[in-house]
Image (cartoon, coloured by chain):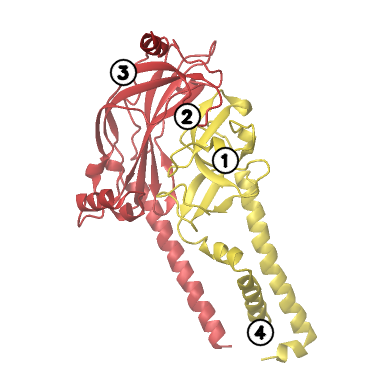
Chain colours: A red, B yellow
Amino acid sequence: MYSSIVRLQNTFGFFTTVAFVIAAFIAASDLIAPRTPSVGVIKPTNVQVVRGRPHYYSSKKEEYAIIKFSLDADLSSLFTWNTKQLFVYVTAEWPSAGGSGSGQNATNQAVIWDSIITAPSADHLANLGPIAMKKLKRSAQGKSIDPSRGKLSIKNQRPKYQITHPSGKVAEQEDVVLRVHYNVQPWVGFLTWNQDADFWKWKTLRNNLSKKFTLPAIKKKDEKKAGASN
Amino acid sequence: MMSSLQNPRQAAAQLMNFGLILSTAFMMWKGLSVITDSPSPIVVVLSGSMEPAFQRGDLLLLWNRNLFSETNVGEIVVYNVKGKDIPIVHRVVRKFGTGPDAKLLTKGDNNAADDTELYARGQDYLNRKDIVGSVIGYMPFVGYVTIMLSEHPWLKTVMLGLMGLVVVLQRE
């Protein structure tokens, strides 16, 4: 029966099949694009521990750490035609009291800084003001892929998030490390993170761990206040 | 066109056919649920809090098994909050402790503040059991159909009616 309904149905069915097959090919093409991300430098530059309210909605005073850091990384190989955005984040990791060492066994992990790097094809989706948006779009005019955005060189960066702990104590914590991670968001397909081992053409992110450091004792904020009131 | 309705045997066969399609879809959904160990393995993004990664109407594939490692910081998870029906898709930004009692804090990439205020009253962190799955796959736009259907309920009736009509009128 060749009624118009059947024809419409067949056309729609064929369209979805083609769309899904193309999407599958695009998703699979990620695998053959080599990934050779590298971190040059990741190190804390200035660490402070303060006692106070880390957020406006904090109900109690607690200790929090502010870790400034420097980061040098080349993540340009992660930008392919299927990359929508790259999410780069730096975590601080430290063992629990009595816990095992840092690294994979770290039992406390907190993001201290993150950054969304959109591919030029996704610039229009970024949450930016009109001026910043114009600047961003102009930075990659005429390009649909801009690997140079993956080159990061950040010096003495203030963290976006302070570190706290449910116990309220972070001062003089030993064996803290900073670790760089990334998450590739595709236009279609599987989300990927930095993997622990080489996977065919995808190399692991080497050198993404800082040296161990110790958080300092609490910086007395009250000293200043006490001085002022005298 | 209506001849099929006059033949009860054919009408019954078409009804069976319609039932088969529905049950196949249901079995595929439940099968995916078993494989991913998630009560709802595919979710549609409803808000812009994870933009620019996810827009409204995008389809996400979830995975809820911890085969090689625990749910870690940086993963995008879908979680439920007690007393709220709508699951939330946000990124894990802090994790204290390990195992089922680990305390997890989430935040939307596009939000300035973390999710403490979205949680239930008196709840400061999520546990693993609050999480329905971690996002592993992404497909844009496709989920917009369901948003349309839930926002304009009459479309549901129209679509079901059309589907029924096509199946009934179809002759093999």
- Label 3 crowding class (10 Å Cα cut-off): few <14, some 14-19, many 20+? some
Q: Tag 3, which chain?
A: A
Distance (Cα) linking label 4 and label 3:
74 Å
The image's mark for residue A166 is none
Residue drawn at the location 34% of the way across and 20% of the way down: A210
What whole-number distance in Å separates the C-alpha atoms at marks 2 and 3? Answer: 21 Å
Q: Are marks 2 and 3 on the same chain?
A: yes
**B117 in relation to A224, above or below:** below
Evaluate if marks 1 and 3 touch, with contact meaning CB atoms under 8 Å apart: no
Residue at image mark 3: A46
Could you say which is closer to the camera, residue A141 or residue B164? Answer: A141
**Residue at the farthest right position:** B8
| Horizontal side, residue B2 vs residue A153: left or right | right
Q: Position of residue A46 (x, y in %)?
A: 31, 18
- CA gap, disc 2 and disc 4: 63 Å
The answer for how far apart the CA atoms under marks 1 and 3 are is 32 Å
State the residue at coordinates (55%, 62%). Answer: B147
Q: Nearer the viewer, residue B75 or B108?
A: B108
Give residue B118's mark.
Answer: 1
SS at circle 4: helix
User: Both on one chain, marks 4 and 1?
Assistant: yes
Chain to which mark 1 belongs? B
Q: Which residue is mark 2?
A: A55
Position in image of residue A180 (x %, y %): 36, 29
Residue B169's disc is: 4
Which amino acid is tagged 4?
Leu
2 or 3: tag closer to the N-terminus: 3
